[in-house]
Amino acid sequence: MENSLDREILALMLKIFTFVACLLLSACFMVGPNYKEPRKPVAAHWPKKDATVKETPFRTAKWWHVFHDPVLTSLIDQGYHSNLTVQIAGVRVLQTRALLAQSVGMLYPQQQAAVGNFTYYQLGGSELQTLLPSTFETATMGFSANWELDFWGKYRRAIQANDATFLSSLAAYDNALVTLTADVASTYIQIRTYEAQIKVTKANIVVQKEGLKIAKARYNAGQTNLIDVEQAQTELSQTEASLPPLANSLEQQKNAMALLLGTVPNGVDGQLKKSKGIPKAPSSVAVGIPKETLARRPDIHQARLDAIAQSAKIGATKANLFPSFALNGTFVFSSNNIGSNSLSELFNWSNRSITAGPTLSWPILNYGQITNAVRAQDAVFQQSVLNYVNLVLKAQQEVQNNITAYIEAKKAEHALTKANTAATKTLKLAIIRYINGETDFTPVLNAEQQQLSVQTSLVNAQANIPQALVALYRALGGGWEIRGINDVVPLQIKAEMAARTNWGTLLKQQNHEAPLTKKERIKELYLPKW
């Protein structure tokens, strides 16, 4: 009789799980919207360019090599391996990958637990004493499970959202590399600019000291009055006073470089001594067409993936409006020491208990609350889409602005080169006329001021060209290719994390890289290696 009943229970459970399997296979629909790519305004060509800016394909992966500066190349390589912001972005990839694996696990029985208890009873005065001994123990041991079926796609939408978030974190890592390479290059150029400005200032101090010497000699010879000497001294002192702020700015830029390279202040001084001069920009630059830029920029990919993730969250929230179906089951052994029974008979097959069956839950009284939660998610999604489209426009603006800056900086440098030649000649002539007594010191003073101003402007113009080019390469989305085939997380950090927490196979590089094929994607999502 008992065997027949067991067979009936097992047959019923088999029917239930068969029904569940069929339900899952047929439940290919998911509530909520499927992501649709928004319309994005993209120009066919860059509106302003010249012969030095070409719309040929942008293929300069390590664009800083165009400056032919080994120190710059060394600094960027060091930053790639040591910058802490980049490392944080890499660890963020591991976090999102773990969250993706967690969401995949929700497709399987959500609650699975071994259950058991031991209870000691001591009964006081009651009617139960006539039925039960005054003291006894009970024990149970078994297994329970709860499986909410993903009939409306709540968990599959969550997987979609977390998968997009995972891919977004990879794009964010690449964007961190774009920012890092540009920041290192820009800071390096600024360091060289301050060094050049200090050099120019010191050279002008030498010239002004010579002017002061001449003024004193003429004053001592009775050929001029004291005002010439005082004017020369004032000009010299003002120029000397401009050196400390320049030295301070130089030191701050060096410290900024040290931070980018993950080292202490003054930690890069030795490297910076190996080369001098502002990097020279190439005579031309390839920028490609706007569509190529948008396809390359990691921050645009990140914005798109964020929108995809948010779209899936709408469906995950909307699924709560519909009834949920779940399967519950327990299998336990139980025993006691009442009468002739013994706790040692706990695992006797006759002491087993089996419960199984479906449940339905429908939060109809929370309809308004859930509906507004869906609306909130939809509003966030719309913001994500608008941010994505706006970033597409902003990217085009940035590229065009820096194309213009690059072109105009070269024009300014060319004009100031001529101005510097003229200013140098003017100062020489003014000094000669002053020595010959043809004029007072005022023309010399004006010529000195003009020369310092022109030379300072020339240094800035010479720096503006490579700075504009660096900004252009940043806007074009170049620099992330420096990673190559390397992992997003250094081996040392992975070793520290593995020593602290059981990461299973998720620390392997292939488990936190974007899948390249549909097969890899299915394996990543639905066949996780725990």
Image: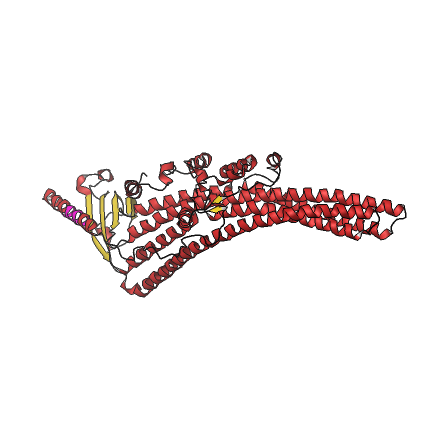
Q: Is residue 234 above or below residue 370?
A: above
Q: Residue 181, how many percent across, how many down?
A: 50, 42
Residue 376 in the figure: left or right of residue 151: right
Furthest toward the right, the residue is: 222
Q: Is residue 312 above or below residue 493?
A: below
Label total for image:
0
Q: Main secondary structure of the magenta part?
A: helix
Scheme of colours in the image = secondary structure
Q: Quadrant of residue 338?
A: top left
- Identify the image quadrant of the C terminus: top left
Q: Is residue 124 visible?
A: no
Name the residue at 49% across, 39% down.
80
Name the residue at 21% across, 49% down.
24
Q: Residue 288, how many percent across, how many down?
A: 43, 46
The question of residue 64 being in magenta is answered with no
Name the residue nearer the viewer: 64 or 318. 64
Q: Is residue 328 visible?
A: yes
Name the residue nearer the viewer: 159 or 188. 188
- Identify the image quadrant of the N terminus: top left
Residue 207 in the figure: left or right of residue 462: right
Q: Residue 384, how many percent across, how many down?
A: 39, 56
Name the residue nearer the viewer: 412 or 485. 412
Q: Residue 124, how many percent across, how many down?
A: 29, 52
| First to last magenta residue range | 12-20
